[in-house]
Amino acid sequence: MVIQQVDKRLLSELEAMGFSEAQARKALHHSGNLSIEAAVNWIIDNENDAATDEMPMCLQDPVNIEIEEIDPRLISEEVKLCAQELRNRSRKKKAEEKKKFESERKKERIRVGKELLEAKEMAEERERKRFLAQRKAEKEEERRAREKIRQKLQQDKAERRVGLGLPLEAVEGDTSTIPATSLLQGTRNSSIDDSVVLPVKPAEKAELLRECLRSLKRQNKEDNTVTRAFRTLLIYVRNVVKNPEEGKFRKIRISNPAFQDRVGKFRDAIKFLELCGFGRVEGGNFLFLPREKIDMGVLKVAGAELQNAITNPFFGLLSR
């Protein structure tokens, strides 16, 4: 297959008028290479035929066609106008096709953008739900852990009260005269013989002592300092319990640097000693516990509370 040969001069003129080589060759071929006017008329008649843009081909060797040159001045104005109109239509058609193509591309970009945005929002929503579910599970786990700690503290508290012979706080009715050992055994008989009641202080004193220690720990975040204060108070209490007749263990000089550094600077620690029976004497310069005011029950309760505050890592966490 070879390209169909046409009059080269006419082909050049048609190309100069703005027609493509394929259009010009096909128009000249079908118009018989007669003239520019005939070729233009053929293009006008077949402007909607997409095949006009295809290069004309033939099977045999082409014959060089020469046509007598026609004076360009002989080309009518009508042909020129038709050619110009064809060029304008062609340009307009190409512009419309380009505009349509750009519009389709814009629509496609918008569609893809929307799909990406929706996918992103769905992924963020899934991540948010997963985070909320995880947070809810963590809160539930934390709640169960706190409840477990609270129950453990209540159990330890009940065991300490039993060991000290104090009544349990959660028993209905009047329990101020019922021994803790009887309460643990489930005995709630209000007719228990008063002769078996242990001579202990009311439970309120133990709670006041415990609250002093809780307050001291809450208001001072340095664990080492608080623990040292607890240990020092425990030494004072034990010395009095072991040596109640020794006056030196029952008298504390408030201005003593060691006392001030370990205990004296804490208001709740001073209050704790006062609950144990110590009082200010000699113009408030000393804390003194008279021999006749020593209450071994109170001191033992104080010692137990101090021991618990020192050894229990959860002490004060769930305090009111």
Image (cartoon, rainbow, N blue to C red):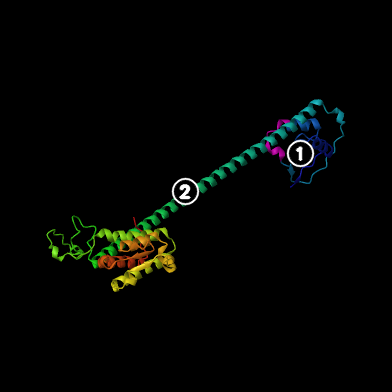
* Image quadrant where residue 192 sits: bottom left
Q: Name the residue beneath numbered marker 1.
A: 20
Judged from the image, the secondary structure of the residue bearing numbered disc 1 is: loop
Q: Is residue 8 visible?
A: yes
Q: Is residue 301 above or below residue 54?
A: below
Q: Name the residue beneath numbered marker 2.
A: 125
* Image quadrant where residue 267 sits: bottom left
Badge 2, how many Cα within 10 Å: few under 14, some, many 20+?
few
Residue at 41 percent of width and 58 percent of height: 219
Q: Nearer the viewer, residue 181 or 242?
A: 242
The amino acid pointed to by label 2 is Glu
Judged from the image, the secondary structure of the residue bearing numbered disc 2 is: helix
Q: Position of residue 46 (x, y in %)?
A: 70, 33
The amino acid pointed to by label 1 is Ser
Q: Position of residue 96 (x, y in %)?
A: 67, 35
Q: Nearer the viewer, residue 13 or 307?
A: 307
Q: Residue 290 colored magenta?
A: no
Residue at 35 percent of width and 71 percent of height: 235
* Image quadrant where residue 153 sits: bottom left
Q: Main secondary structure of the magenta part?
A: helix
Q: Residue 46 colored magenta?
A: yes
Q: Is residue 145 visible?
A: no
Magenta-highlighted residues: 44-53
Q: Quadrant of the C terminus?
A: bottom left
